[in-house]
Image: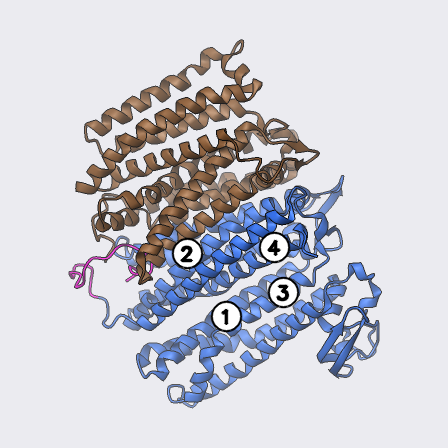
Chain colours: A blue, B brown
Amino acid sequence: MLDALLLSRLQFAWVVAMHILLPAFTVGLAAYIAVLEGTYYFTRRPVFLRLSKFWLPIFAVSFGMGVASGIVMPFQFGTNWSRYTDLTADVLGPLMAYEVLTAFFLEAAFLGVLLFGRERVPPGVHFFAALMVAAGTLLSTFWILSANSWMQTPAGHAIVEGRFVPRDWLQIVFNPSFPYRLVHTTMAFFITTAFVVIGVAAWRLRRGRHEEESLVMQKMGLGLLAVLVPLQVVVGDLHGLNTFEHQPAKLAAMEGNWETQARMPILLFAWPDEAAERNHLEIGVPLLGSLILGHDVDAVIPGLKEWEPQDRPPVAITFFAFRLMVGIGLAMLGLTLAGLVLWRRGRLAQARRFQWLCMPAASLGFIAVLAGWVTTEVGRQPWVVYGLLRTRDAVTPSLTTGDVAASLAVYVVAYVVIFGAGIVFMGRLVRRGFVAAPEPEPEAPAPRAARPLSGATRTN
Amino acid sequence: MALDLVPLWAAILAFGVFMYVLLDGFDLGIGILFPFAPDDAGRDTMMDSVAPIWDFNETWLVLGGVGLLAAFPLAFAIVIPAVYFPILFMLIGLVFRGVAFEFRHLSRRRHYWDRSFFAGSLVATFSQGIVLGTFVQGIPVEGRDYAGGTFGWLTPFAVLTGAGLVAGYGLLGACWLVLKTEGGLQAWARRKARQLAIGVAAFVVMVSVWTPLIEPQIRERWFGGEHPLWLWPVPLVTFALFVLLWRSLARGRDSTPFVAALGIFAMAYLGLAISIFPMVVPYTFDLWQAAAAPNSQAFLVLGTLFLLPIVLGYTAWSYWVFRGKVKAGSGYR
C-alpha cells in the first residue's frame, strides 16, 4: 500500500542514498588532496602539484553536488518527519547543530581559498586551507554518525511525556554503536576514494599516458588499501558483534537466522521467506555462526522468531544487502593483495589484466557503502529510534499520499538530471588529464583566453 | 536551570537567519539578475564575484534550519510541514543553482545551466518569500501539529512577500555588483539597482500596511497604547536608508549602496521581529513554549558562543582574501 508513510520512507531513502555517495567520495578525496598538497609543500616535487591540480576540479564538482544535496537533508526532518523532530530534537538537534558549526562552516570558508586562492595566499596558508577542508569533512562524519548511531543504540536520555530528553551528553554522543560505526564508515569512505584513485590511474595507464602520475596515484592508493582493507575486515567484525549485543533482531535478519539455536551456521546463500518464516535454498558453513558471534560452537544465538512479526526488520533486504557488502569487501581484499604483489615485483605498469580489473573496481566502494547503509538502516526497522519509537509514529501527520508522491517525483527527476550531468562532467575532467608542464609562477601570462571562475576550471 | 537561555537562543537564531538573508540574498540576487546582464562576459564576471563564497553563504541556511530544529524543535515540526511545497521548491531551486557554478563550465550546453542558475535562484527566493508570508499570517495548529491543508500557504499576502523578496534580493545583488565590478557592468548594475529600489520601496510599504491588518497583536504593538513612540525610528530610519541608497547610486558611489541595501534589509527584518515577537509558531506557541529542553539549549550554547566568533573570524578572512574588484577573467590564474 502506497501511503504517505511508505512514500516518505522512499523519499528519505532516495535523497540520503544519493547524498551519501558524495561524502563517500569527498571525505577521502579531501584528505587525499591535503596529503598531496602537503607532500608538495614539503618536497616541492612537481608531480604532487600536478596530481592535486588534477583532483581539485573533480573535488569541486563532487563537493558542490554534496553541498547542494546535503542542504536538502535537514529539511526532510521537518517536511516529512515532524513527529520524529518533535520527539527527538532535544537529543539530536544539538548534534546536528554542532555539525553545522564545527564542520560545514569550516569546509565552506576554506574551500573557496583551496579552489581559488592558490595565487592569493602564501603556499603554507593554501596547504592549511586543504587541511581545514579535510578536517571539516571528518568532523561532519563524526557528528552525523553520532546522531545516526543514537537512533540505533539510544543512550543517555530519559523519556518524559513521550519525548526524549537528554540526561548525559557524553553517553548520547558516544552511544554504544557510535565508535564502531564511526571507524567502520570513515574507513569505508577512505577505501572508496582509494579505489577511485587507483581506478582512474588504471584507466590512464592502459592508455599508456601519464605513467609517472598514474603510478604515483596507484602506489599511494594501494599503500592505503594495504592497511585499511584488512583492518576493515576486523573492524567490520567488531561492528557486527556490537550489533549482535545491542540489536540482535537486526543481526538475525542479516544472517537470515529464524530459529534460536546453538551450532548456528553462517549462510552463504539463502532465499528468506518471511511469510513461511524460513529460508529456501540454504547453503551454509556449519557451526561458524555460533563460533563468530558467541566464540563457542555451542553458543545459543537468538533467531527472528524470538520477536513478534511486527517487531522484525524486513529480512530479505537486510540479508542480501549485508551479503553484497561483505562480498565486495572480500573482492577488494583480493584486488588489494594482487596489486601489492605486482607492485613488489615492479610490474604494476605492465599488468594489463590487473589494470583492466581496477577500472570497474572504482565503483565498488560506492556499492558497498550503499549496501552497508541499507543493512544498518533497514535492519533498524520497524523502529526509527531502536526499540523506542516506531517509524510509523514519526511521520508528519498532515501529509497526504498525493503530497509525498508529488515531492518524491520531483526529487527523483531532479537528482537523475543533476547526478547524471555530474557523472558526465566528472568523466570529462578525468579524460582531460593532467596539466602538461609544472606550473609556471603566477607572473607568467595566461596563454589561453580568460575563462570564468569555477572550481572545475580554475583550480590550477 | 536558573538561567533562561530562550532569549539568547532567539537572538542567536535571529542572527543566523539574518546572516543568511543578507549573504545568500546577494548571491541569489545575482542569479535573479543573471539573464538580464548586458553580455556573456558580464555574466561570467557576475558568477566570478560570488563563486568563492556562495557555498559559505548557503551554509547559514543550514544553520538557520538546524538551529531552529535544535533550539525550538516544536516550531520546526509545525512550520516546515505547513510550507511543504515551498520548502521543496526552495531546496530544488538551490540544488539547480548551486551545481550551475561548476556545471556551466563543463557543459557543452552552457545556456542550459545559465537558465538553471537563473530559474533556481528565482524559485528559491520566491519560495523563501512565501515561507515568510505564511509565517507572518499565522499557522493553524492542532495539538503539536500543523492542522492546515496542502496549499494553506498559497495566499495573496504570501505571493506579495514572495515577489517582494525577489525584488529585495535582486536589489542586494545589484548593489553587490556595484561594489565588486566596474565599467559597463557596474553602470548596468547601478541602473538595475535604482529600478529595484523603487520596487522594493513599494513592497515595503504594501507589506507594512497589510501586516497590521492580519493580526490584532501586530496592530496593537505598532499602533496601540504605550509602544508606538519608541517604534517610530524603525520606519524613519528605513526611509532615510532609501534616500541614502538613491543618492549614493546617483552619485556613483561604489560601496555605500550595498551598505544602504543591507541596512534596509536589517530594518525590514527588525520590523517583522517586532511584529511577531515572542511568537515562533504564530500565533499559537511562543518561544518559551516551543523551546528545547534547557539541558539541550545549554549543551549547545556553550559551543555556539565559542564557535560562532571563530566562524565569523575565518569568514571575514576568506572575504578579505577575495576582496576588491572582480576583473573580467580575473579568476584564471
Checking the image for residue A374, the label placed there is: 3
Q: Nearer the viewer, mark 1 or mark 2?
A: 2
Q: Are marks 1 and 2 in contact (CB under 8 Å)?
A: no
* Mark toward the viewer: 4 or 2: 2
Quarter of the view holding residue A258 = bottom right
Report x, y in % for residue B237: 36, 20
Amino acid type at mark 3: Val
**Residue A256 in the image, given as x and y percentages of width and height:** 75, 73
Residue B317 is situated, as x and y percent measured from the top left of the image, at: 34, 45
Amino acid identity at mark 1: Thr
Q: Using the image as rendered, state which of residue B333 and residue B79 is in the foreground.
A: B79
Q: Is residue B55 left or right of residue B181?
A: right
Residue hosting label 2: A64
Q: State whether residue A178 is above or below residue A304.
A: above
Which mark is drawn over residue A57? none
Q: Is residue A174 visible?
A: no
Instruction: From the viewer's perspective, tell me whether residue B88 is left or right of residue A286.
Output: left
Residue at x-position 22% and y-position 50%: B41
Quarter of the image with the C terminus of chain A is bottom left
**Mark 3 or mark 4: whose residue is earlier in sequence:** 4
Q: Chain of mark 3?
A: A
Residue to which mark 4 is pinned = A146
Q: CA distance from mark 3 to mark 2?
A: 25 Å
